[in-house]
Amino acid sequence: MSSPAALPSEGLPGLDPRFSRLVAVPGRGADEGMTRTWHILDTGPELARLGVSPRGTVLAVHGNPTWSYLWRSIVARSFAAAEAGEPAWRVVAVDQLDMGFSERTDVARPLAQRVADLAALTDTLGLTGPVVTLGHDWGGVISLGWAIDHPELLAGVTLLNTAVHHPEGVPIPAPLRLAGARGVLAVSTVQTTAFLDTTLALASPALTPEVKAAFRAPYGTAERRRAIGGFVADIPVDARHESFAELQRIADGVSRLTVPALMLWGPRDPIFSDRYLDDLVERMPQADVHRFEGAGHLIAEDRDYATAVLTWLAEPQDEEPPAEGTEAAWTPLWERLDARRTDDATAVIEMGAAGVVRRVSWRQLDDRVRTLAAGLTALGVRRGDRVSLLVPPGPTLTAIIYACLRIGAVVVVADAGLGLKGLTRAVRGAWPDVVIGELPGLTAARVLGWPGLRISVPTLPAVTARALGIRHSLADVTRVGAAADLPSGPGPDDPAAILFTSGSTGPAKGVAYTHRQLSALRDILAAHFDVSPGTGLVTGFAPFALLGPALGTLSVTPDMDVSAPRTLTASAVATAVRASQARIVFLSPAAILNVVATADALTADDRAALAGVETFLSTGAPISEALLTAAARVMPNATAHTPYGMTECLLVTDITLDGIRAATEAPDAGVCVGTPIGANRIRISALDTDGRATGDPAETPGVLGEILVSASHLKDHYDRLWLTDREASRQTPDDDARWHRTGDVGHLDDGGRLWVEGRVPHVLVTADGPLAPVGPEQQVERVHGVRRAAVVGVGPHGLRQAVAVIETTPAAAGPGLAAPELAARIRAATDTPLVAVLAVPALPTDIRHNSKIDRTRLSGWAERVLSGERPTAP
């Protein structure tokens, strides 16, 4: 039954009635010879009344079962920007026919018809370029259909969760499969509000009752919901469906689009998962992409998409990145492995349990790398394909990584220390084409639905392999590779790796590196620490375990659980050194704690082996002078270093133990991490009174602010985190170099040394201004009986009060107020007023470093305890 179009009732939250209008449109296709009336939100007439000429038009198309109300935020924000004198964009947000408050036509509207409908509307409106499309759900497909049909008007495309292609042989998402089932379709989508209610329930946080009512407003009866069922029925499951050909036409056309694109994605979407994002990225590699962790299908309700879109529109879209080819000559990461391919000396040693030692020569390693590279290519792995590696450090992982690098595949490495939940989020976020792993990782991949062709390291029984969806074993890859040719290698600026951060300061981020940047890391490491073929490395820190072949020197992985570095013992380090005669030892802070704690078990032979170590490095997080001194006693002839860096730039500054001791006499607060290595550079962006890093980056001594770094080995970008990338490069020096905002806060001293004082989000904005936590924490930690401390804030922003949360020696029996005598000594030791001193058995830290304290979590916990809640573990 048909019914006329209407205007929405006034009072719907967030919807300004000034922008609602009805438009009569001559029909096309099934509507030829008829006129259809649309309801749209259109800021154009109001912009004209302001006398504002817009830069262009954003054409926003909703999906199923929403309506133009979905776009109320960008409608309001864009108009407010125009009123404020900022660059103006007209927004036209449509109610598709039979949807929202547009006319109910009682005519079937398959995909091709809906694309034609939209074209008829824009012709009637007389839209001229530039036009940027904005679509969500099935509206994303329709907006892309319009986009490929109007190249003369199109300036860009923006998308929220949608899809243009579904892989053959893969079932459509379960919610759609259920809703579209025979006997269920009409009941769930038309006769009842079940489909609509389920969609609205996907928002996170939950929508208010008023907003839910607004979304339901056009769909009060079964007759007005008929198109909801029609949209579900129009999903082309296979080539027999009438909309299949049109969807294929759109998918093919999208692959030919060269205009700028922006994709904003909610990964917690049971309908349009990251599988569809990955497909869109392959079709539009020029797209800027941002995945909002925790957001779902209704991303327009979950996150501030409007600001993101308007920010993107305001930026130049045709700028070329700085040319990297002008930098120093590039040598591939595997160049030194090539140079030693006929060498029978040992390249890699793996120390196993019960004294088992595995040695691999340079010749064997090179043969293995080449065979695996050729085999992966023969099995279909191509340049740019992502390969997720769930293999512990050792010769096998080393060979696989170098094989992937040789063929230009992008290695995806996520630390097992992220835990199963974090690892799942990382793997799904990267959406690998291939997963190579041991049995535990592949079992998790199967159970948790991780993507990618699966290759097992061991050869598994056929029944097990089928159950886990494993297509090949590493033995299969080797067998195929023995008879295959090695393809040409990648270029210096091709993507090489995605390394995930520790997740200690939020969801782990994928950090993307090019081949040039990885080679630059190798070169700065070799130069600064004088690594030569005869040096040898013992690496209890996974990222550096893989650089041995690149450096042309022997590398050794000691006996430890690499997912828990704190399991490394002093005896295991000594055994590794003795087996290799290595002169450099790399350890993480978590590993150092246990190495020092287990030093009493060292034998005379162990101590003799460790006395041969010349250089010792603690990498991953700053450690105290006391702990570094204790570690130096284990390796008495080694120069102890603690470089400062992060996953985004692994080596930035360096300081020795002697340098740390000299810094103790300085009046500066924080941890001194030394001076920049090589040609690296540091700048500080000063904090304003609100605790934001807004100052122009400078080298002025004594200024507290966010630390900015620049280096040849600095990461290329964050993977599928466009907004994070943009923030990390905000207000950086305009000198054609690549810069990164670290999120760390600190200052430079008169000697150019960098002092780290915490993280920007952990700065307490008090009535007296910003207060960084590390300085006060150091003062507290000097008090006898305090093992470790965190200073966090409670109270409103701008009036934060400091609270010390401590670990004691001996450990507290449970969380609560610290003993009065200890609290008094702590208050006397610091010049920061403390409103409370709380004691806990253990501070919450990340697994990988065991030193990065979760101050945000502690702050919320302290607020609850001080408000009267029963103390529990933070």
Image (cartoon, rainbow, N blue to C red):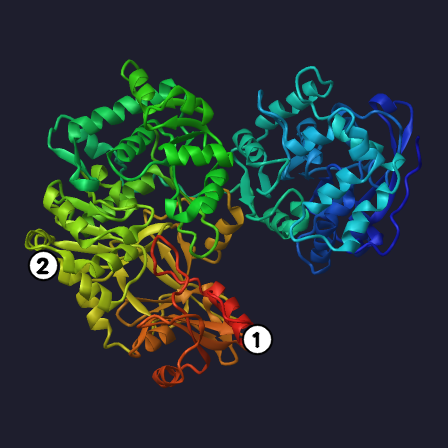
- Which residue is pictured at 84% across the width and 53% down the height? 18
Placement of 630 over or under 89, stated as above or below:
below
Residue 152 lies, in percent from the top left, at: 68, 31
Residue 576 lies, in percent from the top left, at: 15, 45
As helix, strand or loop, the secondary structure at mark 2 comes to: loop
Q: Is residue 152 visible?
A: no
* Quarter of the rendering containing residue 485: top left
| Position of the N terminus by quadrant | top right
- Which residue is pictured at 42% across the width and 70% down the height? 814
The three-letter code of the residue at mark 1 reads Ser
Answer few, some or many: residues within 10 Å of disc 2's Cα (few below 14, many 20 plus, some between 14 and 19). some
Placement of 614 over or under 406, stated as above or below:
below
The three-letter code of the residue at mark 2 reads Asn
Residue 227 lies, in percent from the top left, at: 82, 32
Q: Which mark is residue 305?
A: none
Residue 841 falls left or right of residue 82 = left
- Name the residue carrying label 1: 867
- Name the residue carrying label 2: 637
